[in-house]
Image (tube, rainbow, N blue to C red):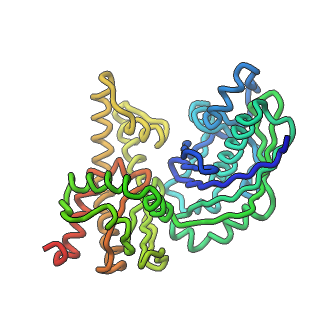
């Protein structure tokens, strides 16, 4: 059997979650957090466990790395649920630190771990056994950086991937599995740019839902069709991440990198402040991922009161963030000019801040372009 595999992947290494789509298959995500392993019980998966571990590899993955992307390669990392529950020191993006993802070990660890985990699944799905020899994977990948980091570090970031191949060793099984990742092509986009492409690809079915939401909340938009929005050439995006908020600007259908900006902070600082308050109230969360997943889950009859209290605290902390964001949006809108037709809001923090931010953005648009609406 051939040990050579090809991977075509789009990877969004977010401060909160990794969003991935590989070889055109269904998109999936995993938390942007790993546990740093200095010692382990070495309880490897036995024959009865192999299928379950492989199928859910991103909640079990135990891996080490030999790569220019990882400066401290000696220690192993636990991913996903195993990483968050191991009780070990965790590695996650610091939303306050001025360190580019391009220069952060965690960014490389998450890219390599995601590709290696999916490679293992791919091989097992096709052969029904674990690989006995080292696998070689030729990768073509697309990544994203915040706009300010894109301008400064894009070329150096690409060079790290293409300098030499990267070796990932998976330690979950009786015999270690080695996967060599060779990066034949690496493309880097600005954060938010891929979302705009995704909206175009999803087309009218997605746009119908988005228009219904807008009509329910604010503008009637009489006579406007989904195709009108999809054909718009002058667009501003607001990509609300945990570490940063990015404003990609598109002019005449192309990214206008000069008018596009990154705004600090992201929604992660809202979550951090809320976590501090909740800890004082006797409701501690261990990470930003903890509180995000709690709020995105449907409350039960048993935790509804707690859910509402926690949501209220997060909303209170989101208000000043949304106010600052709307002021930055006004500055971006002025740079984009009166020709701008559409504003999209997306990103990991968009859902949690939606109710607070949407009326502020609508007010900014009406105020700055009042003649258009009267």
Question: To which quarter of the image does residue 81 belong?
Answer: top right
Q: Image height check: is 150 above or below 50?
A: below
Q: Residue at x 19, y 61 (%)?
A: 219
Q: Is residue 354 left or right of residue 291?
A: left
- Return the residue nearer the eye: 218 or 360: 218
**Residue farthest along the left direction in this orientation:** 374
Q: Position of residue 92 (x, y in %)?
A: 57, 47
Q: Image height check: is 61 above or below 257?
A: above
Q: Residue at x 53, y 53 (%)?
A: 14
Question: To which quarter of the image does residue 103 belong?
Answer: bottom right
Residue 37 visible somewhere in the drawing: no
Report the label total: 0
Question: To which quarter of the image does residue 173 belong?
Answer: top right
**Residue farthest along the top direction in this orientation:** 48
Q: Position of residue 25 (x, y in %)?
A: 59, 46
Q: Image height check: is 283 above or below 94?
A: above
**Quadrant location of the C terminus?**
bottom left
Q: Position of residue 333 (x, y in %)?
A: 32, 74
Q: Residue at x 48, y 63 (%)?
A: 197
- Return the residue nearer the eye: 364 or 205: 205
Q: Image height check: is 247 above or below 212?
A: below
Q: Is residue 106 left or right of residue 267?
A: right
Q: Is residue 302 left or right of residue 24?
A: left
**Quadrant location of the N terminus?**
top right
Q: Position of residue 254 (x, y in %)?
A: 47, 75
Residue 200 visible somewhere in the drawing: yes
Q: Residue at x 60, y 41 (%)?
A: 90
- Return the residue nearer the eye: 204 or 41: 204
């Amino acid at each position: 059997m051939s040990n050579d595999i090809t991977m075509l992947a789009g990877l969004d290494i977010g401060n909160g979650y990794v969003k991935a789509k590989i070889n055109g298959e269904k998109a999936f995500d995993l938390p942007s957090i790993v546990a740093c392993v200095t010692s382990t019980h070495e309880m490897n998966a036995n024959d009865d466990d192999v299928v379950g571990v492989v199928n859910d590899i991103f909640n079990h993955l135990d891996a080490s790395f030999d790569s220019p992307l990882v400066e401290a390669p000696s220690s192993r990392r636990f991913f996903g649920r195993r990483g968050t529950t191991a009780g070990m020191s965790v590695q996650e993006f610091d939303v306050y630190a001025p360190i580019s993802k391009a220069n952060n070990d965690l960014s490389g660890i998450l890219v390599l771990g995601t590709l290696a985990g999916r490679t293992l699944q791919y091989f097992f799905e096709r052969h029904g056994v674990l690989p006995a020899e080292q696998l070689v994977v030729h990768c073509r990948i697309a990544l994203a950086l915040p706009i300010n980091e894109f301008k400064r570090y894009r070329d150096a970031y690409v060079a790290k991937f293409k300098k030499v191949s990267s070796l990932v060793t998976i330690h979950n099984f009786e015999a270690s599995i080695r996967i060599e990742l060779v990066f034949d092509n690496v493309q880097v986009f600005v954060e938010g740019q891929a979302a705009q492409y995704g909206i175009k690809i999803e087309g009218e079915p997605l746009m119908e839902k988005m228009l219904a939401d807008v009509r329910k909340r604010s503008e009637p938009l009489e006579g406007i069709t989904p195709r009108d929005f999809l054909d718009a050439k002058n667009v501003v995006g607001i990509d609300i991440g945990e570490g940063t908020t990015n404003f990609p600007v598109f002019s005449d259908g192309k990214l206008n990198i000069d008018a596009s900006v990154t705004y600090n902070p992201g929604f992660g600082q809202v979550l951090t402040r809320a976590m501090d308050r909740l800890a004082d109230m006797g409701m501690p969360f261990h990470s930003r991922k903890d509180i995000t997943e709690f709020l995105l889950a449907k409350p039960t009859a048993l935790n509804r009161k707690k859910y509402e209290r926690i949501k209220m605290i997060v909303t209170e902390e989101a208000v000043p963030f949304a106010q600052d964001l709307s002021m930055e949006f006004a500055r971006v809108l002025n740079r984009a000019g009166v020709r701008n037709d559409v504003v999209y809001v997306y990103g990991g923090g968009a859902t949690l801040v939606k109710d607070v931010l949407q009326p502020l953005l609508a007010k900014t648009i009406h105020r700055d372009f009042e003649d258009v609406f009267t």
